Amino acid sequence: MNFDVLQPVRHSLETFVSVTNSQNQQMLHADEWMEPGKANKYVGPVSRLWRMVWLLILPPQGHRIIPTASGYILILVSLGLGSAAYNAANNILYMALSLMLSTLVLSGFLSWLNFCHLRWRLLLPPHFRVGEQAVIQIEIHNGKRFIPTYGLWFKTQTADGNGGERVCLNERLNADTSIRLNWYHTPQYRGPERLILSGLESQFPFGFLQKRVGGGIQKTIVVLPRRIEYAFDGMQGVRTNFQGEVSARIGSGAEIVNIRQYSQGDAQRLVHWKATARSKKLMVKQMADESLVGYTLFIETPASIWALGEQFETLCSFVASLAEDLFRAGRLLGVAMNSDSIVPIKKMHDLMIFLEQLAELQLVETYTSQANVKGHNVITFKPGDLNKVDAYVGGKKTGTA
Amino acid sequence: MLGGKRPVRLSNTELFQLKWLLGNLLTLMGMWSLFQLSLSSQPLLYAFSIALMILLCVPRLAGLIMQSIGKSLSLAVLLIVIIDFSLNYVEMIEPITRMVLLLAFFRALQYRTRREDLQLLLLALFMLILAGVLTVSLLFAVQMILFSPLAMGLLFLANLLDHGQQKALTTDDWKDFHWGPFIARVTKGLDTRMLLFAGGLFVAVVAVSTCIFVMLPRFNMGQNLSFMQLHGSGKKGFSDQITFGDVNELADDDAVALRVEPPNRESIPATPYWRMITLDEYRNGSFLFSMSARTSGLQTRTASTYTARFADTDLRPEQQHPDQTWVFYLEGNVSRFLPFPGPFAAARFPQNTKFNAFPELNLIELNQVSNNVFGYSVTGMFADGDIPASEQEIRELKHAKPFVPTLNEEGKVARVNYPMTTLALPMDAEDRAYLNRVLEEITDGQQLDLAEFQQRVFAYLHTRYRYDTSLGDLTTDAGSDPLLHWMRNAQTGWCEHFTGAFIVLARMAGFPARAVTGFTGATWNDFEDYLLVRNNNAHAWVEVFDAQTLSWRRVDPTPQASEALLQATGALASTVATDTGMHAWLDSLRMVWYRRVVNFDEGDQTEMARGLRDFGASFFQDIKKAFVAGAERLEAWLHSGWNLAKIVQVLAVCVFMVLLGYAAKYFNRAVVFFWNLQHRNDRRHRGSLHPLRRKAGKWLLRLQPLRNQPSASDAGQTLEQIYARLLALRYDVLDPSHEAHVLFKQARQVLKKYKSKLE
């Protein structure tokens, strides 16, 4: 058969693996798999053989073998038996010693076999939020043909040393199967956080030696601000009537109610060419739905007004929660931070970028106020009483958190 | 998979139950090993074993017992151990064994955590090794082979279950436990492939263990684990004082007493006598190893070798073979005295041993009776010879006369010094008169030499007395000497009677004589080429001093023609019979155990290494010779003229080579064909295990770095197309008509072309 037409493939070493959850999709590369003794480049069969022999003598970097308590007991018993055997020249003791040493050899072989053809990777949820439990999955694949794998675990922690726990494989992982282990993590602070997954560890088969193979996986995540309760002009996080100026957003209506001058973010298809030609200015159509009110969030964080602490975190959380709710209600036009220009928010992706910026928001020491971010539908934020944060629209206080 | 179905996964509780059961089986195995020790705590051992077996049948009982008396039980165990050690600290083995037994049983009662499982394992291992060291029996090897997989299974399960939430069982977990369903579940949970793999691993462990055992360097530091020895008790018939009947008692005992490995079969005498003790003094119906004989020339040593006086070439018997080595394995609880068939030059023990050597008598006595097999080797032995007399014996006996020992002030027989004890006749006048009459009857008043005297005494004894293990109606007479009483009144007797009768008559005639006890006869085991001597080969005979040859000549007055004796033991047959059958084969296993394992030392290692070296050298020599011969034949064939036969041969070779080439070329296709044939009905195996898919996967790996190289663009479309087709072959639905070999060939060409870019 000729391969003229490419048949659709189900799996691939290099195709993207999509992980779909209820909220989002995350694309991961399949070559993010970790393996014990993973080589960075292709090695030939002869080189592979020498490498395998060398690895038996000197484990690769990141591999560690330490005796457990029972391992130390075994060593002590073997030493005792050996001493008695040599002192008394008793072949019964030699025999017992030989059996213990061969058990140790077997233990090493089975441990090596247990780790053979294993690979693992980290599957992250689409986002992390302060105070909300995120389920991080560790997928392990046993690539062996016949032999199952037992008794593995990973040590998980964050860079600041918090959240250290073991994620264990409690059941048998059959040959040529995968399993996903759940690591439940609740971030405590917004901003970048490094997740550390140690290499695969096991005490298989007899618990004499604790062996760690493979390199760890480190992933830097961005923890979004916490979602909080707030009040915004009567709205408690659900849709209400908004007050504000007519926005320039594309509406679903078909009726033209107005023609106005072009503003940044307007779609090209709304351009009214005739009016543009007549007025020599770029003019756009304003459809009926555009009469719905939209808001622009403007966040200023000068050090003269704000101080790092609970109130600042409340600001970030308030802004994030409000932005999300406004976006869901279709009322979020754009955002601006400090001296940056307004960024229109049209898709979830834009919102996520904004939220990630919020996650890393810090105080600004020298700050010049943005001149063009003004208007009746611009929401600004100022510190309130008792560590609260107040939201203002057109100079009027319309919300607090 | 058993039954071809998907294996059942055992739940955590079931795994815990299996672990508990394995632990208790290990405990039972440890207790089984202790039964061999014959300790005073045997009743306790029986009680614990029975209790453990009941627990195995009804596991729930363990939880109930521990719930009710668990805490007090632990305290009781501690107290018992302390008291036992306080009372019995002298004999360490007994309290140690009891302590280990108690602790193991206590642990067996519990539903154990991982730590407790490890403790139990160590205790069971200790019991096994203790019994093995003390008994040195073949059963130790069997028990270790059974112990190992159970122990590994226990450790495996303990490790597996350690990471879960549950740490130990409770009584409720055993509520619905029944053996039948449990075994059925476990059986269903077994995978045939894994079982075979585990079996293979176990064989590998045994093989590796054997290699380590052989290769471990041996250094004899000359130490003894003195507390790790059990004292045995020897047979009365082989002690330094025997009364009539002590040797005969052993006639019904067919337990093995001695195994002998001769240097070759020709060195075995026709009727071997295994000489253990000389009993030179006769007193009150008993033959004794007199104190003066014991102290005459005594050498007490702690060493691993002993050089006898016959190492001296001047004293060595003519037929002695200096280089030949005899190896003996004396079973435990036989005797302190070591059997030898004749004079020897040197004896060697596996380790430093405390012993008493009697050079003049050619005897060695151990410090205590060994409880287990004692092995020793002897060089320079003359297996069928007389014992040359020592200077003192020659000096004192050559012209000595028989005498009656005098009585001392207390009315007891005064001490007589060796070797005069061999002429002493401590009898009253009446008995002496009787002996004189008998002697007169035998010798007719003539002065006979030893050979003639011996024949006539044999004739006299064999005419009047018959060998039988029973004395018939003969009653004992408290007042008279039992030997003389027998001589006067009996018609049947044992070897001791005939020996005693000969001795007294010989002494009366002026020939120094002493009794000797040991074994006579043996059976030959063809499986391992050694001689087997049993307790019922026990025998007593005489050694008479020959003034002509200046040696002690062996004389056996017991009649050899006795039908009863032949039926009973066959031990006095003049030839060594060959033992065959299952018993002989089983016994040969024990011999292998003693020879190859228990007594394996650095000499054996050297010999093994030498053997390997010689084997390797001869093997390569043979290969080389075969190769050279083949080359010469080929050369001759090539130089021979052409003929029809030669042409046919050449054509056949060419055709064969072509076929071989095609076979190599289409090997892959053949593999695929047979694979498909085998798995045509098995959808599951049409996945990644397919040989073509595996090969495609390997090619993908090999081409991947090439695609990542910046210069890969040179490969262009060709590489991408090939890569895409390999992907499809690897992961897509497998089409049997795929021309995979063409694709692999193209991949090879691309890789070869751009290989330099990888380096």
Image (spheres, rainbow, N blue to C red):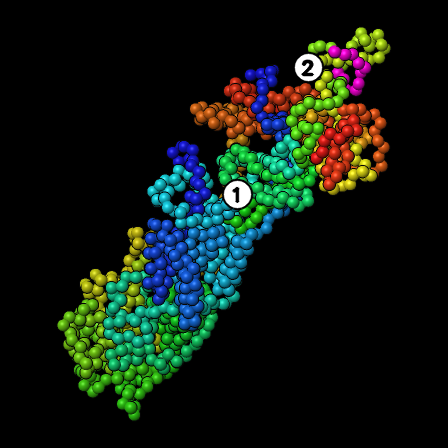
Q: Is residue B673 above or below residue B156?
A: above
Left or right of B749 in this view: B217: left
Left or right of B26 in this view: A394: right
- Residue shown at 52% from the left, 55% from the top: A74
Which residue is nearer to you in this view: A218 or B357? A218
Front of the two marks 1 and 2: 2
Image location of residue B515, percent across then percent down: 29, 75
Left or right of B624 in this view: B752: right
Q: Is residue B338 visible?
A: no
Q: Sequence order check: which comes first, mark 1 or mark 2?
A: 1
Q: Which mark is residue A252?
A: 2
- When asked about the image quadrant of residue B343, the answer is bottom left
Left or right of A195 in this view: A81: left
Q: Which residues are magenta?
A: A257-267
- Judged from the image, the secondary structure of the residue bearing numbered disc 1 is loop
**Which quadrant, please, contains the C terminus of chain A?**
top right
Q: Are marks 1 and 2 on the same chain?
A: yes
Q: Kindly check if marks 1 and 2 are in contact, taking CB atoms under 8 A apart as contact.
A: no
Query: For the residue marked with disc 2, what is the amino acid?
Result: Ser
Image location of residue A60, percent across then percent down: 64, 44
Residue to which mark 1 is pinned: A151
Mark 1 and mark 2: Cα distance apart in space: 58 Å
- Judged from the image, the secondary structure of the residue bearing numbered disc 2 is loop
Query: For the residue marked with disc 1, what is the amino acid?
Result: Gly
